[in-house]
Amino acid sequence: MASAKSFKLDYDAAGDVLYIVQCREVATRGVEDSTEIVWRYAENGDLLSATVVGFRERWNVQRRPLAKKIADHFDIPVAEAYEVVMDAFARP
């Protein structure tokens, strides 16, 4: 299980895209869900990263639901995922 501190965050303000990276390994598969989050997986099925399209526009008033999605996919507690979300929103 990962912790909130193990994620690298990068925010592209021009595109309103948040990148959440747990591991720099090369992804072999990406799956976009209905909320425009692309989940990237290693060949062995491990989740490596997530790309959140429309981060501020879509999730600004839905921070807890986003944290829940992150927690469920990365297998971390919701409280830790919420820290990741709040850290991302604190970025310019």
Image (cartoon, rainbow, N blue to C red):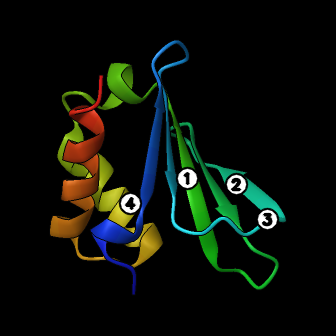
Which quadrant does the C terminus fall into? top left
Q: Residues within 10 Å of mark 4 (few under 14, many from 20)?
A: many
Tell me which residue sits at (66%, 64%) in the image. 24
Q: Are marks 4 and 1 in contact (CB under 8 Å)?
A: yes
In the rendered structure, which disc, 2 or 1, sits on the residue that comes first in sequence? 2
In the rendered structure, which disc, 1 or 3, sits on the residue that comes first in sequence? 3
Name the residue carrying label 2.
31
Q: Are marks 1 and 3 in contact (CB under 8 Å)?
A: no
Q: Identify the element where label 2 is drawn.
A: strand
Q: Identify the element where label 1 is drawn.
A: strand
The residue nearer to you, when weighing 3 against 73, is 3
Name the residue carrying label 3.
26
In the rendered structure, which disc, 4 or 2, sits on the residue that comes first in sequence? 2
Q: Please state which amino acid type lies under the numbered disc 1.
A: Ala
- Gap between marks 2 and 3 measured at Cα: 15 Å
- Gap between marks 2 and 1 measured at Cα: 9 Å
Tell me which residue sits at (18%, 29%) in the image. 61
In the rendered structure, which disc, 3 or 4, sits on the residue that comes first in sequence? 3
Name the residue carrying label 4.
70
In the rendered structure, which disc, 2 or 3, sits on the residue that comes first in sequence? 3
The image shows a total of numbered marks equal to 4
Residue 49, percent across and down? 58, 59
Q: Please state which amino acid type lies under the numbered disc 4.
A: Ile
Name the residue carrying label 1.
50
Q: Identify the element where label 3 is drawn.
A: loop
Q: Are marks 2 and 1 in contact (CB under 8 Å)?
A: no
- Gap between marks 4 and 1 measured at Cα: 8 Å
Q: Residues within 10 Å of mark 3 (few under 14, many from 20)?
A: few
The residue nearer to you, when weighing 25 against 29, is 25
Look at discs 2 and 1 and give the one toward the viewer. 1
- Gap between marks 3 and 4 measured at Cα: 20 Å
